[in-house]
Amino acid sequence: MGDRGVLLVTGGSRGIGAAVCRLGARDGYDVVVNYAARKDAAEALVAEIEAGGGRAVAVRGDVGVEADILSLFEAADRFGRLAVLVNNAGIVDLPQALADMSAARLERMFRVNTIGSMLCAREAVKRMSTRRGGAGGAIVNLSSAATKLGAAGQYVDYAASKGAIDTFTIGLAKELATEGIRVTAVRPGIIETEIHASGGLPDRVRDITPSLPMQRPGTAEEVARAVLWLASEAASYSTGAILDVSGARAILP
Ligand code: NAP
């Protein structure tokens, strides 16, 4: 059993979330691997963590559905004391100009990426806030370099849904600053995961690589290391901080 409490990772079954789960288990957290559809991937990850001597459980739940979020946190309560929430679950959509976007698309984008993260944070705060009898903790949100680039002609809805996450991170950090909970975010650049294919652009990473400052995409593990540092005691004075992990992409003066 880990000695650092429970690390709950939304969208922990694949990509960046899975890397956070793997490294978090190695760091001594008990890991709740949330997933939406890919039970196979989540269960394989749990088996991998257990084989390495860690403790993990896979819990289905769509962060776009409040009832699912409530049962996800109840499952986490049964697993142990919540110490860290990583709001990682996120979606993109097919490249489109705003003029062609449906209201349903916009609502889904914000329901999953923004409201889902806010509702998960709400449930975490209820459990972790020292003002409410909790032992404190950390919340790390996954933002995106798109918040600074805007993603014109591709998915301005996604960029805006993540821009709201940046603002939310700052506000919630201040709101909880005396309640033992630090709130931070990571802004990844182009990271090699399946998200690009799910947005209809399977070759996006390859196509964009020549324009990246470091001439390569980042890995999920490189983002995960930043997430776990922000969640750890080593980052005890970092709250409201938004860390770019983008290989200098979208870095502004
Ligand atoms: P990914 O490879 O597509 O994985 C997405 C994960 O989120 C999967 O585990 C998926 O679960 C889960 N998920 C999707 N919708 C969900 C929902 N409604 N409820 C619960 N879980 C859900 O994505 P990724 O590239 O690792 O991205 C992770 C985060 O980083 C996202 O917030 C993304 O916006 C952000 N980000 C990524 C990049 C990049 O270049 N990759 C850049 C900037 C920011 P299933 O396995 O069940 O489908």
Image (spheres, helix red, strand yellow):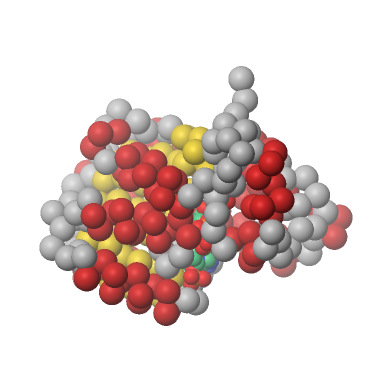
Horizontally, residue 202 falls left or right of residue 152, namely left
Q: Position of residue 25 (x, y in %)?
A: 25, 58
Horizontally, residue 185 falls left or right of residue 159, namely left
Q: Position of residue 33 (x, y in %)?
A: 35, 66
Horizontally, residue 250 falls left or right of residue 50, namely right
Q: Pick whichever, 58 or 81, lies toward us.
A: 58
Quadrant of the image occupied by residue 69: bottom left
Q: Residue at the spot x=49%, y=77% of the render? A: 37
**Residue 59 in view, yes or no:** no
Q: Pick whichever, 188 or 75, lies toward us.
A: 188
- Residue 88 lies, with reference to residue 152, above or below; the image says below
**Residue 110 in view, yes or no:** yes
Q: Residue furthest top?
A: 253
Q: Position of residue 15 (x, y in %)?
A: 48, 60
Quadrant of the image occupied by residue 104: bottom right
Q: How many marks?
A: 0
Q: Residue at the spot x=54%, y=58% of the render? A: 193
Horizontally, residue 175 falls left or right of residue 81, namely right
Specify the quadrant that holds the C terminus: top right
Q: Residue at the spot x=43%, y=45% of the render? A: 222
- Residue 230 lies, with reference to residue 89, above or below; the image says above
Q: Residue at the spot x=39%, y=56% of the render? A: 19
Specify the quadrant that holds the N terminus: bottom left
- Residue 105 lies, with reference to residue 39, above or below; the image says above
